[in-house]
Amino acid sequence: TSYMTQLRPQFHFAPKNNWMNDPNGMVYFNGEYHLFFQHNPNDSIWGPMHWGHAVSKDMVTWEELDIALYPDEHGTIFSGSAVVDWHNTTGFFDGEAGLVAIFTYHLDKGDEQPPVQTQGLAYSHDNGRTWIKYEGNPVLGHTDKIDFRDPKVFWYEPSQKWIMVLATEQTISFYSSKNLIDWHFESEFGEGLGSHLGVWECPDLFLLPVEGTATAKWVLFVSIGDNPHGSIGSKTQYFVGEFNGSHFTTTQKDTLWLDHGYDNYAGVSFSDIPQEDGRRIYVGWMSNWRYANQVPTAGWRSQMTLPRTLGLTKVANGWLIKQQPIKELFDYTENQVTDIQFGKSYETTSPLTILDMVIDNMQAGQVTVTFHFGDTEEVKLIGRGKEGFVTFERANSGNIAFHDFFKQDASVTINQPITAFQAIIDRYSIEVFINNGRFAMTNLVFPQACLTSIQIEANHDNIHISEGTILVAK
Ligand code: FRU
C-alpha cells in the first residue's frame, strides 16, 4: 500500500487491535526490551484492564505478543512495573534471575462502595512469554486511600532493598522490601507541592546525572489525572531532589512539566538497562484522558511516544529535564536534504520525516514551520522572540471535531532564546524538541493525508539556519 493509505503509526508502538493506555512493566532482559501496556482487548474504549505485551531488540520495531496478565478474583490489572530479580530475592526462580511484575489490582465493588486497589505480583520463567500470579496476592493491601496504585519498583543498592513508589490519591508513598513480597511503609511526599489539579498517578523515581558535572540528582515523575474543569487535561510533572532510601525531599518551588504538548501522559522509565549502556529511557502514552476515548482511529486506539533518553541540566532558577529520541531511531533514517533554507518548501513521501535545525539569532523575530498534509490540512509550529514563545497550532490539522478541547493551541514560553528545533512526524503525531530536548511538545494530529511537505519561513533577515537537515525513513 502507498504511504497515503497508512492509517497507523509506522515508528510508534500502537496495539494491533482495541484500546491501549499507559506503558507498563518496561524492562530490559536477555537482549529484549519489554513493553507491557494497559489494554482492553475487547473494545476500543477503556474497560476491564489487562496487560498487553510487546518486545523489541531496539525499542523502534516492536512485536506484539499474547496478553501477559488477565484479570482474576482480585480485580482487573492496572498499571505497574517489572524488574529483573537478579538474586532471586523472591524465591520464585530457583537460583536463577527472572522477571517479576508488580501491578495494581482494581476491584470494583458495585455502585454503593468505592473500588479497592491493592498490589499484586506475577513472575515469568520464560522471558515474559507466560506469567504465574503469586499465590499470596495481594502483597500490599488496601488502606484508607481509594487511589492506591501504579507501583514502580527499583533496587536501592545502599540499603539492599526494593523501593516501591506508589501513587496514593494526591501524594506519592514510598515502601521498601527485601523480597518484593513483604512491604514496609517508609514515607509520603507531595502535600502542598507541585500541581494538584488532578489525582496523582504513575510515579517513577530514578537518579539522573547532572549534565556537565560528576553529580547526580533524584527525579520523581508524577502524572496528574484530568480535572474535567481544568484547562490542561492530563499531564506529567516532575520534581528534582534527594532520596535516602526512605524519604524524597526537594527544595523546588515551581511546578515543572515534562512536556508542553497535550499528548504525553503516564510516562515511566525502563528498568534494568545495562550499566554499560547507562541511559535512562522513558516512554509516555501519547494521548490525553480528556479525549483519549474519542480519537478517530479505526479498530485500534492510542500509541506510545518514541522512547526518549533523559538528561538533567542545571539552569539559573532550578532544573530542566532534557529528553531526546533514542539514537536507535536514526538507524532507520537517512538525510534527504542537508541545507534547508528559509522561504522554501520541502516535499516528503516518507512514512517518517524528521526536521532538524539549529537557528541563529531567532530572538530577532519569528520562525514559522508549516507541516502540510495534502492541500488543505496543516499544522503550524511558531517560535518567536527573546522570551522564546512557541506555539503548536492544530486547529486546521484535519479531524478535530471529535472533541472541543482538541482544537486549542499548545504553547510554552521557554524563557531563553530558541536555538534549535527538531520535529518528528509519523502518522497521527508530531513530537517537537526545542533546544536539544530541553523542552518537548508532543501532540497528536488526525489529517486525512500523510505529511506532504514542510515549509520554513523567518520574518527577519538576521535569523539564519546554521544547520538544517530533513531525514526520512531508509
Ligand atoms: C493512568 C491510569 C493509572 C491506572 C490506569 C488504569 O492513566 O489512570 O493510574 O493504573 O490508568 O488503566
Image (cartoon, rainbow, N blue to C red):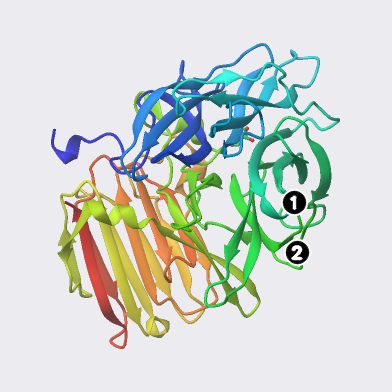
Closer to the camera in the image, 236 or 383: 236
Going by the image, does 231 lie left or right of 38? right
Compute the Cα span from label 2 to label 1. 21 Å
Identify the element where label 1 is drawn.
helix
Closer to the camera in the image, 292 or 81: 81
Q: Residue at x 23, y 68 (%)?
A: 469
The image shows residue 297, relative to residue 31, as above or below, that is above
Specify the amino acid type for callout 1: Ser
- The CB of the residue at mark 1 lies under 8 Å from ligand 1: no
Closer to the observer: label 2 or label 1? 1
- In terms of image quarters, where does ligand 1 lie? top right
Across and down, in percent, residue 258 comes to: 56, 57
The image shows residue 7, relative to residue 213, as above or below, that is above
Q: Which mark is residue 282?
A: none
Across and down, in percent, residue 340 comes to: 20, 72
Q: Earlier in the sequence, mark 2 or mark 1?
A: 1
Q: Quadrant of residue 90?
A: top right
Going by the image, does 364 lie left or right of 248? left
Q: Quadrant of residue 308?
A: bottom left
The image shows residue 436, relative to residue 58, as above or below, that is below
Give the residue furthest to the front: 95
Q: Which mark is residue 250?
A: 2
